[in-house]
Image: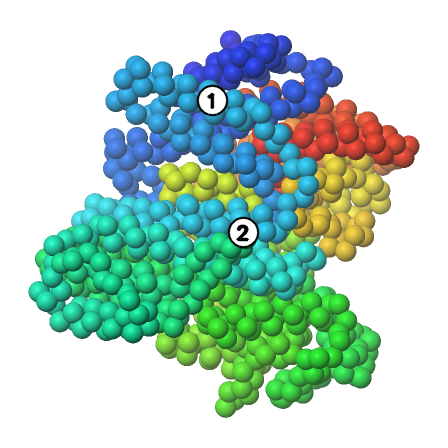
């Protein structure tokens, strides 16, 4: 029995689908004259060829086969959820709306309590280009098409002829996929990364928002609640999107002010085009025979105003659709939208004298349309079609996604020093100022609205870059308002002056305004706490920041813009660098504790803290099941507004197809709602195992740092992983290192995780766990037993250990030993390999000890999927090791032409393995 047959017998239909696809693929290869490859398709025979026999054609073959496996597993999970909902109830799927409403009802919450909180929820996924998507955009499109064809096979109503035709379509799709090189020849530029983000924002998410709302309403009714409570669009939770592509400058010199300007234009263009498309669909849906004179007065009045406004601004304008007042009305709304067109492949927006300036103006007119339809006895259409249109405008506005601007605190320091030099002040002295002196200087400067220099004065590169980008933001706000702008995020925030520096830089660009109390920023300034040390200091820094008069003025200004209500301060926390800094246990616990302390600081100032979670696509960078992540947050921390990054390949994995996209958005919104409701009754309290978790985090961090800070470790790492190849890859526009220095501190967390995952020894998500748990068990059995119990019923402990467990399952010591053999020139190599192998074994034993159920039973799907993948990945890894050795040898000899050819194959192997394991970094 082959491994595929074993997995198929255990897990069923998805793997029968894989057999079907592999069979189709074999026919495609035979038809293409690739008979030898057709007989070497992984999983179709008992034996897998060795890496020594691998060629570039095998790499392509394996890459495609792993994509087919990914497709059937995603579809299998979706079909399984549908089947459960059909056979049991909507409440049968953990984490979704029906499940959460049912649980909250059992906990004693009333429908009115729930409805009251529902409208306060606001979730904002923020799309980024990193850690990066390894597959080319053209390949992504073909894979999406193939997925849709596989979904069509689920339709049991097709005749035999139709099924045969569908099979032919699948084969044609496979022919296309087979002929595409799935590796970037050149690095993608920011513009092409933005195009990929815009695809999701325009082609996926508008429909996803509508389908999410429908599922919420179905779940609400199934729970026995009054549908009228959530009939109005304003009663629903708010969904919006953020974007970093074109705004994230941290270590990314290609993101210039001009790139940001073009990004904002492109986002606005596509937002308006999306609304125009949706309004046109709505217009066709209200083609009713209705003279305007018979519709309610408010509608008639607005109809006449719009008609007059457009007719006077556009002589010769003629109202279409006689006796179809609702259709005519939407025609007015379409005419009032700024016009969009492409000129020489560039987006052009034409603002007419009577154009809407803000989306709220369009929303107001849509509510009048809705009232008119209700008065016309067309309530069902009013509360379905028009509600959906209102939701799309509310979600995407005229900006599509809010653009954040992020930069490193050290870059800001250099910018201010250069400004001071340009102003004939002591820039070099500023860099060397002690903290107290720097703070005093900034406080004195922020009492005045006077800039350091005139706009015409030439500046140093960091100062010019920062000021130019801020001026682009200021110009955009002046014309369109601030709805399309997110926050100014300061990465590596290590002191309150890192945040005050942004205020000074804003002052130079016209982003500060005067208030009766002094200067205020027009845009929120947001700290990003990333390392263990920064997280530990975060509450103190935040306290000083919230105490500052300019921050108080800024928050008050934001409150006034939002028509009163609560005062909010956003804080971003990083899951990547904290993990690279201290290992997984320390990272997760310090993040947990930092949130608790910052919430208390917020309460002290009468301010609600909203957290922006900087999570990646791998467990080492914060990934994990969304609903479990939300439940694991500190009690009292969830106030209703949450942002979190959706990075690179994660976007494709979660949102490439409609069914999966709706599922993932629903998990996020429903989970945020449920935890906000629960947290509302809880003041922030320490975790009941805080002392034990302090011990575990501290011990595991010591163990992790003893490894990563040992002399010789960096040399071992650079030889035993493909980090040098990854740094040459073309899959993302951003450099792998912040400044180019060969240190662990300078290396970004993404390539750090990526390199360990490629060689299947994910130390970033388990190293230090086993030795720490073993020591606890031996020294304090009572504490260990308490922790074992918590693993069953405590959301935080369960979440962390489940993620460690997942990472252990995909770690493969025999594979890593092949990579470690490349580090024979490093004297300490045997010591490092021994330490890591022993810790892997210890961690596996301790996790098994705590969770007690064998892996194949506690994570059956994951266990068998990993088994299937591991079999086919073995020759991939062997081939990559051969290529790494050959490339390094040729490079050391200075043989550039041959080394470049080998590098191309090596990067294809990186892509193939990333596709096989499902993530890069």
> In the shown orientation, is residue 541 left or right of residue 271?
right
> In the shown orientation, is residue 833 left or right of residue 173?
right
Circle 1 residue: 172
- Image coordinates of residue 129 in percent, x first then y, are 58, 49
Instruction: Name the residue at 47% across, 79% down.
Output: 557
Residue situated in front as seen by the camera: 651 or 230: 651
| Residue 307 makes an appearance in the image | yes
Instruction: Name the residue at 24% across, 46% down.
Output: 218
Residue situated in front as seen by the camera: 161 or 118: 161
In what element is the residue under mark 2? loop
Circle 2 residue: 345
Residue situated in front as seen by the camera: 472 or 83: 472
- Image coordinates of residue 616 in percent, x first then y, are 57, 47
- Image coordinates of residue 542 in percent, x first then y, are 58, 71
Report the mark closest to the observer, 1 or 2. 2
- Image coordinates of residue 818 in percent, x first then y, are 75, 25
Q: Residues within 10 Å of mark 2 (few under 14, many from 20)?
A: few
In what element is the residue under mark 1? helix
Instruction: Name the residue at 32% across, 60% down.
Output: 334
């Amino acid at each position: 029995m082959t491994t595929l047959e074993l997995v198929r017998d255990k897990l069923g239909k998805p793997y029968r689908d894989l057999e079907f696809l592999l069979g189709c693929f074999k026919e495609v290869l035979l038809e293409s004259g690739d008979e030898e490859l057709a007989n070497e398709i992984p999983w179709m025979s008992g034996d897998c060829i060795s890496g020594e026999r691998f060629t570039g054609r095998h790499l392509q073959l394996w890459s495609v086969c792993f994509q087919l496996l990914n497709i059937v597993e995603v579809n299998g999970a979706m079909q399984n959820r549908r089947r459960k909902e059909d056979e049991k109830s909507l409440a049968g799927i953990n984490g979704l709306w029906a499940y959460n409403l049912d649980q909250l009802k059992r906990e004693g919450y009333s429908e009115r309590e729930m409805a009251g909180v529902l409208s306060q929820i606001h979730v904002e996924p923020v799309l980024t280009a990193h850690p990066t998507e390894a597959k080319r955009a053209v390949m992504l499109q073909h894979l999406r098409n193939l997925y849709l064809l596989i979904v069509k096979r689920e339709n049991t109503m097709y005749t035999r002829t139709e099924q045969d035709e569908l099979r032919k379509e699948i084969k044609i799709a496979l022919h296309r996929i087979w002929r595409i090189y799935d590796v970037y020849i050149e690095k993608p530029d920011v513009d092409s990364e933005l195009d990929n983000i815009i695809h999701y924002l325009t082609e996926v998410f508008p429909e996803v928002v509508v389908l999410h709302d429908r599922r919420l309403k179905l779940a609400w009714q199934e729970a026995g609640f009054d549908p009228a409570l959530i009939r109005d669009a304003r009663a629903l939770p708010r969904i919006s999107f953020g974007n970093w592509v074109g705004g994230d400058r941290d270590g990314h010199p290609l993101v210039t002010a001009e790139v940001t300007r073009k990004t904002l234009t492109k986002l606005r263009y596509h937002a308006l085009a999306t609304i125009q498309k949706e309004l046109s669909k709505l217009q066709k849906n209200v083609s009713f025979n209705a003279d305007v004179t018979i519709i309610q007065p408010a509608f008639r009045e607005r109809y006449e105003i719009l008609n007059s406004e457009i007719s006077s601004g556009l002589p010769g304008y003629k109202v279409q659709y006689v006796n179809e007042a609702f259709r005519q009305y939407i025609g007015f709304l379409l005419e009032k939208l700024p016009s969009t067109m492409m000129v020489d492949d560039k987006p052009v927006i034409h603002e007419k004298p009577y154009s809407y300036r803000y989306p709220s103006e369009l929303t107001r007119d849509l509510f009048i349309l809705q009232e008119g339809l209700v008065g016309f006895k067309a309530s069902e259409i009013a509360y379905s079609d028009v509600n959906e249109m209102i939701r799309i405008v509310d979600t995407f506005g005229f900006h599509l996604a809010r653009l954040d601007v992020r930069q490193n605190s050290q870059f800001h320091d250099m910018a201010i020093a250069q400004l001071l030099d340009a102003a004939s002040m002591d820039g070099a002295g500023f860099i060397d100022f002690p903290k107290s002196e720097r703070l005093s200087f900034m406080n004195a400067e922020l009492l005045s609205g006077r800039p350091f220099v005139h706009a015409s004065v030439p500046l140093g590169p960091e100062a010019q870059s920062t000021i130019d980008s801020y001026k682009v933001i200021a110009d955009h706000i002046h014309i369109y308002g601030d709805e399309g702008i997110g926050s100014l995020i300061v990465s590596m925030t290590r002191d309150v002056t890192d945040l005050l520096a942004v205020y000074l830089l804003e002052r130079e660009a016209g982003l500060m305004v005067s208030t009766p109390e002094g200067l205020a920023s027009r845009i929120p300034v947001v700290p990003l706490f990333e390392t263990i040390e920064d997280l530990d200091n975060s509450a103190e820094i935040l306290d000083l920041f919230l105490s500052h008069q300019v921050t108080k003025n800024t928050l008050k200004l934001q409150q006034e813009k939002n028509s009163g209500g609560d005062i909010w301060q956003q804080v971003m926390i990083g899951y990547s660098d904290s993990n690279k800094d201290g290992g997984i246990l320390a990272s997760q616990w310090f993040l947990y504790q930092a949130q608790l302390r910052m919430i208390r600081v917020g309460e002290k100032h009468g301010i609600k803290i909203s957290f922006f979670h900087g999570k990646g696509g791998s467990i080492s960078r914060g990934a994990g099941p969304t609903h479990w992540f939300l439940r694991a947050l500190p009690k009292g921390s969830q106030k209703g507004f949450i942002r979190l990054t959706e990075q690179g390949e994660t976007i494709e994995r979660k949102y490439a197809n409609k069914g999966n996209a709706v599922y993932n958005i629903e998990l996020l919104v429903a989970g945020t709602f449920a935890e906000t409701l629960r947290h509302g009754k809880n003041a922030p309290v320490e975790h009941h195992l805080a002392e034990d978790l302090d011990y575990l985090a501290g011990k595991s961090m010591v163990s992790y740092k003893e490894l990563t800070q040992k002399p010789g470790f960096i040399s071992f790492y650079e030889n035993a992983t493909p980090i040098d190849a990854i740094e040459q890859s073309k899959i993302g526009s951003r450099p792998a290192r912040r400044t180019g220095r060969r240190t662990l501190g300078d290396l970004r967390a993404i390539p750090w995780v990526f390199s360990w995952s490629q060689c299947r020894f994910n130390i970033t998500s388990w190293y230090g766990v086993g030795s720490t748990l073993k020591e606890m068990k031996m020294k304090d059995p009572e504490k260990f037993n308490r922790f074992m119990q918590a693993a069953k019923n405590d959301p935080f402990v369960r979440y962390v250990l489940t993620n460690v467990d997942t990472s252990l399952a995909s770690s493969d010591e025999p594979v890593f030993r092949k990579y470690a053999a490349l580090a024979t020139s490093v004297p300490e190599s045997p010591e490092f390999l021994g330490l890591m192998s022993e810790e892997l074994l210890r961690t596996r034993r301790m996790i098994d000890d705590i969770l007690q159920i064998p892996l194949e039973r506690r994570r059956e799907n994951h266990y068998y999927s990993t088994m299937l993948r591991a079999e086919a990945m073995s020759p991939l890894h062997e081939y990559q090791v051969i290529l790494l050795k050959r490339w390094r040898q040729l490079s050391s000899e200075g043989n550039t032409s041959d080394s470049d050819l080998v590098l191309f194959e090596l990067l294809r192997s990186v892509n193939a393995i990333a596709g096989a394991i499902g993530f890069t970094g």
